[in-house]
Image (cartoon, rainbow, N blue to C red):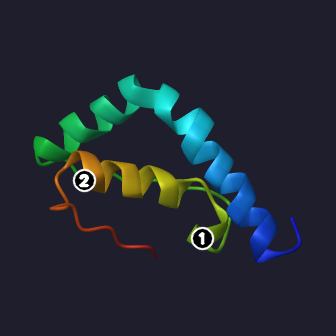
Amino acid sequence: MRTSAEYEALLAAYERGGLPKQTEALAALQGWIEAGEIVVLTCFERDPKCCHRHCVARALQDRCGGSLAVVHL
């Protein structure tokens, strides 16, 4: 990927196609969060906007009713 538009298109496709198929994994993550566990999403991408982990984090925020605080390190 070379441009932000290419990343945006790729991640939009992931949010439409791949992420909705991950209900079981998202439910497990949500369960850990609601149980008070610390959940860390890692990846080799430096910029979270160029990685699927920010899509996963946003999906988890939606599932948790917006109460989940996400911190990108």
Q: Is residue 67 left or right of residue 25?
A: left
Mark-to-mark CA distance, 1 and 2: 22 Å
N-terminal of the two: label 1 or label 2?
2
Find residue 31 and name its label. none
- Give the class, few, some or many, for how many residues have Cα within 10 Å of label 2's Cα (few <14, many ≥20): few
In which quadrant is the N terminus drawn?
A: bottom right
Where's residue 10, x and y in %?
73, 53
Q: Secondary structure at mark 1?
A: helix
Three-letter code for the amino acid on which mark 1 is drawn: Lys
Q: Which residue is mark 1?
A: 49
Residue 44: name its quadrant: bottom right
Query: Between residues 49 and 34, which one lies in front from this camera angle?
Result: 49
Mark 1–mark 2 contact, CB under 8 Å? no
Where's residue 66, x and y in %?
20, 61
Name, please, the residue furthest toward the left: 35
Nearer the camera: disc 1 or disc 2: 1
Q: Residue at x 36, y 35 (%)?
A: 26
32 vs 6: above or below? above
Q: Secondary structure at mark 2?
A: loop
Residue 9: name its quadrant: bottom right
Where's residue 17, x and y in %?
61, 35
Q: Residue at x 24, y 68 (%)?
A: 69
Q: Is residue 12 left or right of residue 63?
A: right
Q: Which residue is mark 2?
A: 38
- Total label count? 2
Where's residue 55, x and y in %?
50, 55
Query: Between residues 28 and 62, which one lies in front from this camera angle?
Result: 62
Name, please, the residue furthest toward the right: 2
Query: Between residues 60 and 15, which one lies in front from this camera angle?
Result: 15
Q: Is residue 27 left or right of residue 49?
A: left
